[in-house]
Amino acid sequence: MRYFAAALSLVFFATLTVNAQTSQPADDASAIRATVTNYIEAYYTGDAPRMAHTLHPHYLKLMLHGTIPVRQYSGADMVRSVQAGAPDMATASKTEQVSVLDINGTIASAKLITPGWVDYMTLSKVDGAWKILSVVQQIED
């Protein structure tokens, strides 16, 4: 009987461990989607503090647009750009599709699709919060 109780306890704790491990990526995926959504909505609405909250201290954005030379933005550049005001876009164009591509510990990748561009993002978990570390943006003509 003692062996049965010990075996049952072991199975119970193993189940708890597996459930805890499998729920964490789902929680992380939701948090990553929220970070990317806050990023694009901050851009659409001109909300600089909200934008700053999504960015990693070492944020870097590279913008690719046809034959135009690659443009580069730091986190400070992004916040200043958003602070200057919301883009002049029709409300119907302010849509997005966010996909979490991969999560590995404290790093992740995501894809943001809008009507005018696609962003591939690298995120890093800092002090329990997901922050956007880098963006490569392909602007469509």
Image (cartoon, rainbow, N blue to C red):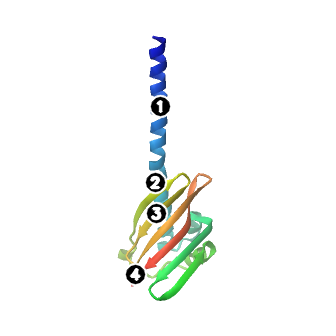
Q: Residue 134's image quarter?
A: bottom right
Q: Earlier in the sequence, mark 4 or mark 2?
A: 2
Q: Residues within 10 Å of mark 3 (few under 14, many from 20)?
A: many
Q: Which labelled disc corresponds to residue 29?
A: 2
User: In this orientation, which residue lies closer to the viewer: 80 or 112?
Assistant: 112
At label 4, the amino acid type is Glu
Q: Residue at x 44, y 49 (%)?
A: 26
Q: Residues within 10 Å of mark 1 (few under 14, many from 20)?
A: few
Q: Which labelled disc corresponds to residue 14?
A: 1
Alpha carbon distance from label 3 to label 2: 9 Å
At label 2, the amino acid type is Ala
Q: Position of residue 70 (x, y in %)?
A: 53, 83
Closer to the observer: label 1 or label 3? 1
Position of 73 relative to 22 (above/below): below
Q: Which labelled disc corresponds to residue 110?
A: 3
Q: Classify residue 30 as left or right of residue 130.
A: left
Alpha carbon distance from label 4 to label 1: 49 Å
At label 3, the amino acid type is Ala
For mark 2, give the secondary structure: helix
Alpha carbon distance from label 3 to label 4: 19 Å
Alpha carbon distance from label 1 to label 2: 24 Å
Q: Quadrant of the N terminus?
A: top left
Q: Residue at x 44, y 16 (%)?
A: 4
